[in-house]
Amino acid sequence: ADSSRECLERIELPLIPVLLQMERLGVNLDAGVLKELSNSFADTIKRLHEQIIEAAGEKFNPDSPKQLGAILFEKFKLPVGKKTRTGYSTDAATLAELTKLHPLPTLMIEYRELTKLKSTYLDALPRLVAGDGHIHTTFNQTVTATGRLSSSDPNLQNIPVRSELGRQIRAAFIPDARAFFDGGEEALLLSADYSQIELRLLAHLSEDIGLMAAFRDGQDFHSATAAQVFGVSLEEVTPQLRSRAKAVNFGIVYGQQAYGLSQSLGIPYREADEMIERYFAVYPRVRAFLDELIAQAYEYGWVETMFGRKRHIHELKSNNPNLRGFGERTAMNHPLQGSAADIIKLAMIEVQRRLDLEGYASQMILQVHDELVFNCVAPEVERLSAMVAEVMEHVVELRVPVLVDIGIGANWSLAH
């Protein structure tokens, strides 16, 4: 209980006033950008709807999984994957499997993504704008099991990170010069993002020599892994090899096995299995460390982060092998993802202390995943960038360097 208490007193309680301040300030929203986007999404959705009806060869409601299932599996006789209580499953994984067999599943995947983003963000965000023109999200400290923050109304964690659509939505989040004394200065958004923090934690916690060396040398980490795992020189690493190594790197952090890797890369099971074996041959301490975590979870029923945040894993007591598998993956991932969550929270507490102490006008306004976002007054850009990077990189000293990427721009999309 002592380590849990320390986590509470050192991290969660001091974070409350920091989150309160961020919720109170909110983030400025460009409603015009959202309106335009909503209209353009509506046009695209209408066009997709027409293509879907054409591909199906008959009128039906694409929003009804039941009707879609009947067309895919009864009319077109495509191979049935999972069954649900009400009929055929048409979830994302099922549709992805069918894309090579018929054009309809591809159209449906795109249609669903667009309709979801439109209703969740483009149409909902303007309704959440308060009298000050800002959106005031709610940060939750007690929702996730890993210790990460979550947010609601709106949930900012779910805006797609890599996709073009996600970027377009982020472009509506803008700085606010009115927040500063005279409002005469230009305002910008500053984004500070931890680079590969969970993989750096894996190197730190496993103390694997090769993994630590790859980060200490400052080379591109995924390329370095590719060179090691595929036995080629750094110069010979192709983009395809790098992306495979990247999938293995992140897969390991989430306790992914050969089956999961073969699915995500679209390669045969045997090939995925060999890649994981080669990875562990190159980084042997990683396997030993992950095995230790699983053994500890079976023995004590919980695992914990570097800062004593425990997670009890009841699934390990189950007779169901799928549930036990989930429990083992959780045992491997929690100390990494949970420690990353602890570290960014400690950084937020210290950054806010420095903002107050050193008399900054700029404000910390958002936290999403491994990123902090600031409403920044232009003359403070350089000083703020240096301070935030210094705090985030050194709030906890690891056996490998911690790196933060800083971006600045006229909206969140340009800053990130």
Image (spheres, rainbow, N blue to C red):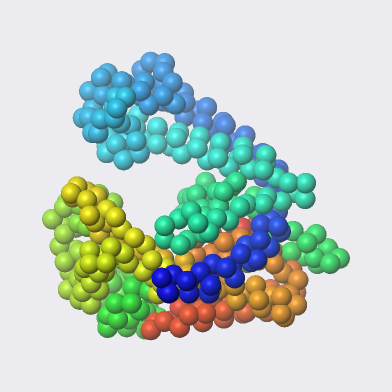
Residue 384 in percent (x, y) is at: 66, 76
Hey, which residue is sitting farthest front in the picture? 1
| Residue sitting at x 25%, y 30% | 83
Residue 233 in percent (x, y) is at: 25, 76
Q: Taking the image as drawn, is residue 289 in sight?
A: yes
Relative to 18, 405 lies left or right: left
| Residue sitting at x 46%, y 39% | 113
Hey, which residue is sitting farthest right in the picture? 182
Residue 103 image-quadrant placement = top left
| Residue sitting at x 47%, y 61% | 148
Residue 217 image-quadrant placement = bottom left
Residue 214 in percent (x, y) is at: 33, 79
Residue 318, above or below 47: below
The quarter in which the N terminus is drawn is bottom left
Relative to 42, 353 lies left or right: right
Hey, which residue is sitting farthest top in the picture? 58
Residue 322, above or below 214: above
The quarter in which the C terminus is drawn is bottom right
Q: Taking the image as drawn, is residue 333 in sight?
A: no
380 or 220, which lies in front? 380
